[in-house]
Image (tube, coloured by chain):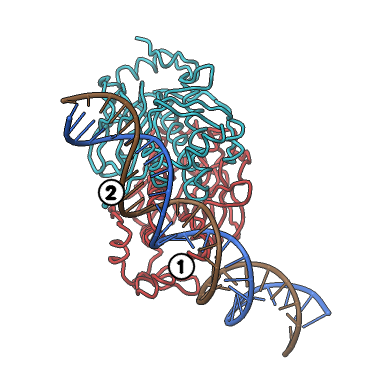
Chain colours: A red, B cyan, C blue, D brown
Amino acid sequence: MACPLRKCGNFLPVDDAVLAFIDDFRSETQMLPAGETLIREQSKAQRVFTLFSGWAFRYKTLSDGRRQILNFMLPGDFFGLQQQFTDGATYGVEALTEVAVCVFPAARLWDLYRAHPQLGYDVTWLSAREEQMLDENLLTTGRRSAIERVAVLLIHLFKRAQRVNLVDADNGFAFPLTQQHVADALGLSLVHTNRTLRRLQQLGLHELADGRMVLRNAKALKQLADYVDHPLNAVPLI
Amino acid sequence: MACPLRKCGNFLPVDDAVLAFIDDFRSETQMLPAGETLIREQSKAQRVFTLFSGWAFRYKTLSDGRRQILNFMLPGDFFGLQQQFTDGATYGVEALTEVAVCVFPAARLWDLYRAHPQLGYDVTWLSAREEQMLDENLLTTGRRSAIERVAVLLIHLFKRAQRVNLVDADNGFAFPLTQQHVADALGLSLVHTNRTLRRLQQLGLHELADGRMVLRNAKALKQLADYVDHPLNAVPLI
DNA sequence: CGGGGTCTTGAAACGGCTCAACAAGAGTGG
DNA sequence: CCACTCTTGTTGAGCCGTTTCAAGACCCCG
């Protein structure tokens, strides 16, 4: 059965043999409501995932409850890999909206490398791509001011939504994050996030209401954030 | 010829065929002085590296010069992978001390996956491991206070040095970072980094002089930093 | 002897945090 | 249909952690 996500045109094509392997590799497809935990911090789950629809996020928490969101996941994102190489998950993953995920048994990951080196290469590719996003997030939380941080996040999520055809003609898209999520992703307090968001909105750079975001002035946002634009190259999908 | 680093006991053993492939894969071994650039930001280098000896670091800069150090590299670390999947390097790498690196042609990376899936798996492993460190750094810069940040960094570098037998019996090891490096790694200003380092030293938690660091009270540092200890499992070496 | 890099310290300014209160909407149960 | 609570967003006031500016010490090296 063909995967509808694959047809959106922003993923690399694969031949039938590989497709069949992926299909067989997948143990199930799951639907989960918003707020559900996909990977529990410290747990020893033996599964890896591809997000098929919806949004999710990866996070870590300190023992006193402070939370840092590491990155957001959109359709096509592959996750759960790292726990494979450690004694357990060093982070948690939570659904931001209702999500559909393809579930794979981590134990068979090594089979994948042996049977289809191409897929192994693709896994590495996706992993490296996620690492790049982390690099950017680290630069952001470490060295950008609050207003720059928010601007970067808005553009970044916009670009990512665009890849999977989630953005409409008016630069609008569903924005399922609460301000608390934004704060936790950027290393800011909730209150200051609110003020900063408000300030950007008053400058006319974006509009955010009822879970919907519209980028009003992407160029100004990019300039404000010192954002370097990368072309939207096709990426693997597993 | 046997790699001395491999014998230190903290790397996974590999069989002779794989070893021979790695040997053939390596295009050269280079020595570079401290301060030298191994990968230039924005460049299109076609090489990946394994650090054989010395320290290096990976960083990103904003157009106005603000710099964020993403992570530090110690012997055994594999880097340069990400640029393979983008149009160029999205970060820079600089030698912190004199370094020796094994250089591999990135163009042959795909050969590696095909010829030895085991090595492909190992590359992913190393990539996932680096990502874990980035996760931790992101949590640190996003959610920890200055004193917690410094404490985390000290423990983390200590543990990493320990893995490659760089720590002596008195918990001392060569510490080639300037305070500016520490500041750039933690998202702090130089002045505040100085004060914080000083404060920790006065508390008797560590000692730092003449490029040499001694952990005086690792337990207190861990507690202060809310640091979760992971066992020192063996990792692949390429 | 001069100059550049690193470390150190003081003083003042400021960005972001905390505390606190309130509004609006959604869901729940009587 | 109305209280009630819970979640999310909003705004003010004051404080504090960190930054910035500035200056001096020390050391190595040409």
Q: In the picture shown, does residue B208 fall above or below B92?
A: above
Distance (Cα) linking label 2 and label 1? 35 Å
Residue B202: image location, x then y, percent: 53, 35
The chain to which mark 2 is attached is B
Q: Amino acid at mark 2?
A: Gly
Residue bearing the label numbered 1: A174
Q: Amino acid type of disc 1?
A: Ala
Q: Is residue A157 visible?
A: no
Instruction: Classify mark 2: residues with Cα within 10 Å, few (<14), some (14-19) or many (20+).
Output: few
Q: Residue B161 — which label?
A: none
Using the image as rendered, state which of residue A44 and residue B101 is in the foreground.
B101
| Quarter of the view holding residue A225 | bottom left
Q: Which residue is tagged 2?
A: B65
Observer-nearest residue: B198 or A33?
B198
Element under disc 2: loop
- Relative to A134, is B210 above or below? above
Side of B210 where B202 appears, left or right: right
Marks 2 and 1 belong to one chain? no
Along the viewing direction, whichever of B67 and A98 lies nearer the viewer: B67
Q: Position of residue B165 (x, y in %)?
A: 47, 18
